[in-house]
Image: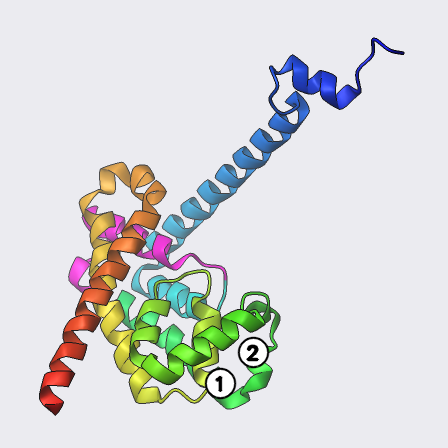
Amino acid sequence: MRGRRPTALRGSAAAGGGPPRGLVRRVTRTEKARELAAAYVERRVDVFLEHFGYTAILAALLAGGLGVPVPEELTQLSVGVLAAHRVLDLRIALVVVWAGIIGGDTLLFALARRHGPQALRSRLVARVLTEERRRALQRHFARHAFLTVMIARHLGGVRVAAFALAGASGVPLRTFLLADGLSSLVSVPVVVGAGYLFAQHLSQVRRDLRAIELAGIAAVLLVGALVWLWRRRARA
């Protein structure tokens, strides 16, 4: 018994001190499964948009705004690619994408305004909007509602919850529409344009989607700062 090691330790030693081989294989299989699932969703989105055109764009973005798991950024990239291949007219597509985003966000905002705290208890919102996040967002809405809506538009993980909270917390509809519309007016050309310009390298663009989102946030912050400075000078 003295010369034997526990099984887990022997597995680690066989791997040169690293994790057990079985664990590595399970992690690798999980990653591959996620990649295959993501690739399947991407193909379905592409086929759906190509087949039904502008109606599909509007439907996908309206659904995404209400929390249906249709990747909004993926839809925008696919629109850019289809426009590059002359399946869609880029100018019309940009307008439809913008309208779909604003429409979905406004529907969510209006539903949350109507149902109030009950909307925040829905499973989709409650699992993201922890008590700590809720308090922090409420503070931001109270102080800087316009800028908070603009930034939340590009935070995919909390966007739906943040907009539901904005509606339930009494953020004025005019403020919400102006902030969301201006933010989307900046970001939509960035994301759709990336799909249009780099249509031949779409897989790489999709892998770099986070960088594109950050670029959109940076552009939105810049525009928000300019609007704030303009309003401050107008009041002076």
The x, y position of residue 63, in whole percent, is 45, 68
Give, as a three-letter code, the residue at label 2: Leu
> Residue 219 versus residue 133: which sits nearer the camera?
133
Q: Is residue 20 magenta?
A: no
The x, y position of residue 1, in whole percent, is 89, 11
Would you identify the image quadrant in which residue 171 lies?
A: bottom left
> Residue 67 versus residue 40: which sits nearer the camera?
67
Q: Earlier in the sequence, mark 1 or mark 2?
A: 2
Q: Residues within 10 Å of mark 1 (few under 14, many from 20)?
A: many
The x, y position of residue 24, in whole percent, is 61, 26
Would you identify the image quadrant in which residue 142 lies?
A: bottom left
The x, y position of residue 145, in whole percent, is 34, 81
For the residue labelled by badge 1, is the local secondary structure a helix, a strand or a loop? helix
Mark 1 and 2 residues: CB-CB less than 8 Å, in contact?
yes
Above or below, 192 against 16 in this view is below
Q: Which residue is mark 1?
A: 168
Visible in this render: residue 209?
A: yes
Q: Main secondary structure of the magenta part?
A: helix
Q: Which residue is mark 2?
A: 120
Furthest-top residue in view? Answer: 3
Q: CA distance from mark 1 to mark 2?
A: 8 Å
How many numbered callouts?
2
Which labelled disc corresponds to residue 81? none
Which residue is located at x 49 percent, y 83 percent? 112
Asked if residue 108 lies left or right of residue 226, the reply is right
Which residue is located at x 26 percent, y 68 percent? 184
| Segment colored magenta | 69-95
Give, as a three-letter code, the residue at label 1: Ala
Would you identify the image quadrant in which residue 162 lies?
A: bottom left
Visible in this render: residue 88?
A: no
